[in-house]
Image (spheres, rainbow, N blue to C red):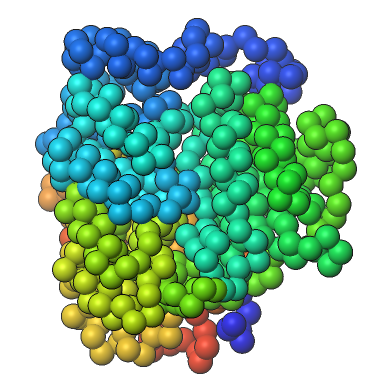
Amino acid sequence: MSTTASPPATRGAAVRPPRAGRSNGQWKVDGTEPLNPNEVFKAESDPLAVRERIEQIYAREGFDSIPGDDLHGRFRWWGLYTQRKPGIDGGRTATLEPHELEDRYFMLRVRTDGQALDPAALRVLGGISEDFARGTADVTDRQNLQYHWIGVEDVPEIWRRLATVGLETTTACGDTPRGFLGSPVAGIAADEIIDPTPVILEIKRRYIGDPELANLPRKFKTAITGHPSLDVVHEINDISLVGVVHPELGAGYDLWVGGALSTTPRLGERLGVFVTEEQAPDVWHGVIRIFRDYGYRRLRNKARLKFLLADWGTEKFREVLEREYLGYALPDGPAPAPATRPGDHVGVHEQKDGRFYVGAAPVVGRVGGNTLTGLADLIESVGAESARLTAHQKVVVLGVPADRVDELVAGLEPLGLTARPSLLRRSTIACTGIEFCKLAIVDTKDTAARAISELEVRLGDVLPRLERPLEINVNGCPNSCARIQTADIGFKGQLVTVGTGDDAEQVPGFQVHLGGGLATSDREDAGLGRTVRGLKVTAEGLADYLEKVVRRFDADHEQGETFAQWAHRADEEALR
């Protein structure tokens, strides 16, 4: 643990309360009349029912047979978004209609929910990539696997293959309970407080695919961990269950609600209650129904659970949960202890059974079909068991025999995975970006990958002196899918004006956020990064800026001081 103080821990931007005297779309207050087009199409029919139409009509008759409400709405309930048409620059993102931006292919999101992926599952995932997705596959920071170039004609066969290994795309997108974040070392870590696997499986068994939870005000994100590294970014989920030990009741969970980033970031808050393993599914169900029944549906940009929590406060939220939805009071409980070590699990670690798990980093989450299939072969060849994805776009191989660890580590490298990454490669993540995303303004994956490769050379004299990884998050638009506000250095994609007068032009670039972070072994409390007035960099100049600010940190920081601590105290000129 650092001996210096943590940076300021801000809960997030001020949230304006809903207007009094008019309907805000809260079902239990205002009734269920739809107040905007999104609410109308959800009310017209169960969005989950679109699966039958995909299988029976659209996969047979093709893309042109899909009506707009299904294509731009209900398809999301099964993990499908149309992807961006190639060749449309970021300056046109905000000026074109969805049908002008979209291609005739889809992004498909597969939820893993913390599931251990055995070689059979990895081969299925790799085969889907090669057979239907032009070799694409990305590990997201939600532990999902994301494909591109999917044709609607192939979706039923993809679903059939996924089902053979217990995977699905149910409610992977849309106004639904999205994929769960689960500890990548659940059930195997020697220092685990409680194994979250039974809770995740029970919630999924009871509630995923339930039509009663298929019409939420907006998305609903879940994180559950029992590991002391706090490895599921619990502060930025709608609901998080974090392993703790109650002095009288033993191991269980601390309940957090109302976290989310996007354009109005807000960190989640503890309700101060202790939840047993047996109670956890009911508590999760209570919180999501509060969101369904009381969430603000009038305006989609005010519809996340964080806005309700900001209006109610934690005391009222706890009271409503216990009185209206559980029917019993929950005991007070302890807060999670400070994180014991990094939650990305990169490197070699001993399991409780004497075997080892090995965390490895791809480059900004890109894996692809060959990597997934090759990983399956490698796991079998060394006698390991399976792999899990992480909330940091990493892969963790589980159950490696002690005498085969070195062989596994060496075998990962040709697959584009490394258990010994540089401090930059280890901690850089990026969203999909303009290559496939209709909301993006700039490229992210290739831009970040190029910057890492350059900086590993240009900062070769500095990197050995850094005591800890620098988290660099690159996002293609303001929506913060790559968590820009909680990174050491976060880049928010936008167009940047260079030159003056008649020579001025707009080019791809980024606004810079500095000094954010979630609770880790280096900081006890999460906090949002700061921005510096006028500080923007071009995409072409990203590596130059990073080299400059990292060198300035190396020269100016005090002993034991983290980048985030330094960034919050440094004057603006030092950060430019």
Q: Where is residue 478 in the image (x, y as percent from the top left)?
A: 40, 45
Q: Quadrant of residue 452?
A: bottom left
User: In this rendering, does residue 554 appear at all?
Assistant: yes
Where residue 90 sits: x, y (%)? 22, 40
Q: Where is residue 272 in the image (x, y as percent from the top left)?
A: 79, 54
For the C terminus, the quadrant is bottom left
User: Hey, which quadrant is residue 357 in on the image?
Assistant: bottom left
Q: Is residue 217 visible?
A: no
Q: What is the x, y in percent for residue 510? A: 31, 55
Q: Nearer the viewer, residue 130 or 514?
A: 130
- Residue 41 sits above or below residue 297 on the image: above
- Taking 351 as reference, is 16 left or right? right
Residue depicted at 78% across the width and 54% down the height:
274
> Which one is nearer the viewer's eye here, 546 or 417?
417
- Left-right relation of 274 to 417: right
Camera-nearest residue between 41 and 185: 185
Q: What residue lies at 86% left-to-right and 64% top-to-bottom?
A: 248
Q: Is residue 526 left or right of residue 472?
A: right
Quadrant of image for the N terminus:
bottom right
Number of numbered discs: 0
Report the front residue among 244 and 268. 244
Q: Horizontally, is 177 left or right of 110 in the view?
A: right
Q: In this view, does 177 lie above or below 361?
A: above
Taking the spot 44% from the left edge, 15% from the top edge, the residue there is 49
Identity of the residue drawn at 31% across and 78% down: 404
